[in-house]
Amino acid sequence: MTAVQQAPAAGTPATPPPGAPPATRSPARLRRAPAAPPKGLRRALPRTVAGRVRAFTALIVVVLVALLAVVWVAVANARHGVRVIGHDAGPQVVATGDLYFQLTDMDAQLANALLVGGTGSGRDAALARFDEDRRKAGDALLKASKLADESTENQTARQLLEALGKYERLAGQALLLDQRSGHAPGPPGDEVLRLYREATTLMKLDLQPKAYNLTLDNGTLVRHTYEEQRSAVLTGRTWTIVTGAVLLVALAGLQLFLAVRFRRLLNPALALATLGTLVLLVAATTMLSGQAGHLRTAKQDGFDSLLALSRTRAISNSANADETRFLLDPGRADAYEQVYLSKSQTVLYLQAHNLADYNQKIQGDLEFRPGRPVPFLGFLGTEAERSSRPDQVEALRKVLGEYRRFQAGDRRLRDLVNGGRRSQAVAARSGTAEDFTRYDQALQSLIGIHQAAFDRAVDDGDGGTSGWYAVVPVAGVVLALLVLAGVRPRLAEYRFSK
Amino acid sequence: MRGRVPRAALAAAAILAAGACGIADAGERSVVGRHELVIGVNADQPGLASRTASGGYEGFDIDVAKTVARYLKVPAGKVRFKKVTSDTRKDMLQSGAVDLVVASYSITPERKVDVTFAGPYYVAHQDILVRPSEVVRSVHDLKGKRLCRVKGSVSFPRVHDEKGVAAEPADATGYDDCAARLGAGALDAVSTDDLILAGLSARAARDGRALKIVNAPFSDEPYGVGLRKGDVKGCEAVNRAITSMYQGGTARRLLGRWFGGTGLNITTTVPQFEGCD
């Protein structure tokens, strides 16, 4: 460029030759000042001071609106999460978990009624409980099918209803036949036994698995909501901090700009707006962190434990019924002993060769401490792993103690049967039934503790966001007014000075 | 000029708002959304999973694996089978050499520590295979009988040590060998998972020798689909695949195809799942 000296062609907005004397004001030079096109972002900047103040103000208002929108969306996510987990699907899934319990209990009561025989009060009590279980099972099934959101789940619910009808028919036949034969306590007649086997096989292979799987499926709905909403709340928190920081920088920038341009020390209204933004930012961030925490407590400490313990209770109950069946049906005693062991190991797993071995090992050391590896697995092992609060730990220790006592009673009963003293074993059954009731009560109080933690977290979640739909618009109006109040006199001053 | 500033800021705000709504947990390697799958299977269990003359695989496990892959929307041409054994399957799953394991893999609380299990897709039981003339009604009748013992298998110790039945050990190299010796009269009984016994019995029947399954189950073996630990999403999808496999009648058809006519009592209703977490 420098080497080639060209006469400026007419109309060409070329830069003047560098060597040209500064005194000569060529037409090209004159055109240059207004035409020098501001590049990039600078193009967007207004060039008058008033324009800049207005632009700055507009920017602040826009960022403020963005901040409020982000907080609003995060609050909405948090509230949605708490609603689904705490009030909607969560409690309903826990209720459908009880379906499994009701079904196993129906079968257990049927076994009791047939084992007791005759028309004794024990039989009446068993049948009354059977009817109550049936009614509750119907309710739980209705809830479960309402929650079903996939075609496979709907189909499972429908098949469950069909199988339940079939089970009731078989149970009714067995009971009627048993009543007519009027048998003494102990194993019933062959035909009754055949019907009972058919019913209990249907329960074990068809009804129970489907009920269990249905609750698992429903549970995934809660898990998905939890993961999505919690992640949305945490993302909302991040964006709150980002937009809040941008707003603070913009407010500080305006303050500085005004201080330099108008030679003022501090603009009180703007300073107040800055302070208000800071307070809003800290409050919103704290609230969102709290919400994420409440969601986690409700899900992990409440919902997960409630669901797992409701399964523990159902499987324990079903194992207890297998003990009855072991007595009731000597022909299948081996199989019933086997499933008793496998259910016991689902509840509390210890490596064991057979039931006698398990019964013995369970009397060993079951001590656990929060934060240390738990020496056993299974549902109670998982529970021990996630128990940290002292009341949970204490209640779980009580459960373990009662479980151990129940297993010891079971051993004595089986030893009687193996020693050929079956009638004594049938008499001893009421003792182990009481042990089981105590264990079940201990489980229920542990469930109560988790229920309380769940309710508390849900209440906190509801309370933590309750005012925010009002806070957000009010804070927006106040901050916007403060900014305008800070800028208006300066703009007016500028107008007058002009 | 004045209008431009808010518009630029609005655009920035829009980007911020969009970012706030959609951030999913990243870095998760699930079997869901794959275009191809490598599935670990056994190669030496007739009826469940064995090599064909052409070098492929066939059996109930293989068909279950294919059904699951189809449900996960992986085309049949993109499914590869890889041989695993009880020693290698956990490591191969963890190292990513296989994505899924469908290989008569019993779910146990100990295994659940390292592996996420979907299913079970079938609950097998340890049972007994004898010659039709033999009178064996339950595991206790094996007392004094020559029972096949395969090195590395837990089936013999389960009868002898756990059930306390004093059976005489008769060593063999594998369950194929057991069935051959049983047919030849070199031993009296074979005891292992009923589906394996059914496969052996079906093969023996094709060779013109009849063997009888006692139908006296004395253990539960929940066969699960092994997934990499923590793939809850994949586990839920596989569970739905198994549910629909039973609902649509596919499971009944497959069980009938591989184990029908063997005298084994087959369960054709969906098993109780373990749960994914």
Image: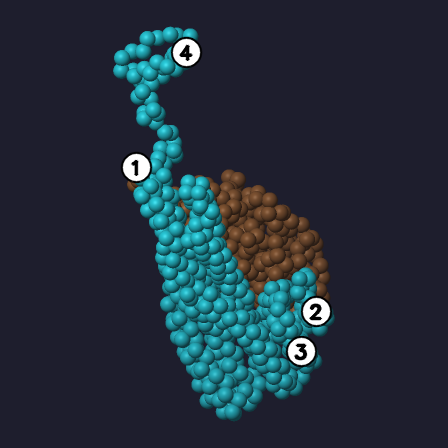
In this rendering, position of residue A241 left or right of residue A24: right
Classify mark 4: helix, strand or loop: loop
The residue identified by callout 3 is A405
- A366 and A273: which is toward the camera: A273
Sequence-first disc among 4 and 3 = 4
Can residue A233 be seen in this snapshot?
no
* Mark 4 vs 3: CB contact within 8 A: no
Three-letter code, disc 1: Met
The residue identified by callout 1 is B1
Chain letter for the residue marked with disc 4 in the picture: A
Q: Residue at x 38, y 7 (%)?
A: A5
Q: Residue at x 66, y 58 (%)?
A: B154
Give the class, few, some or many, for how many residues have Cα within 10 Å of label 1's Cα (few <14, many ≥20).
Answer: few
Three-letter code, disc 2: Glu
How far across and down, in percent of the image, does residue B87 sit? Answer: 65, 49
* Mark 2 vs 1: CB contact within 8 A: no
Sequence-first disc among 2 and 3 = 2
Chain letter for the residue marked with disc 3 in the picture: A
In this rendering, position of residue A383 left or right of residue B169: left
Circle nearer the viewer, 4 or 3: 4
Confirm whether circles 2 and 3 share one chain. yes
Classify mark 2: helix, strand or loop: loop
Which chain is brown in the rendering? Answer: B
Give the class, few, some or many, for how many residues have Cα within 10 Å of label 2's Cα (few <14, many ≥20).
Answer: few
Can residue B227 be seen in this snapshot?
yes
CA–CA distance in space, label 2 to label 1: 75 Å
In this rendering, position of residue A398 left or right of residue A240: right
Which chain is cyan in the rendering? Answer: A
Name the image quarter holding the N terminus of chain B. Answer: top left
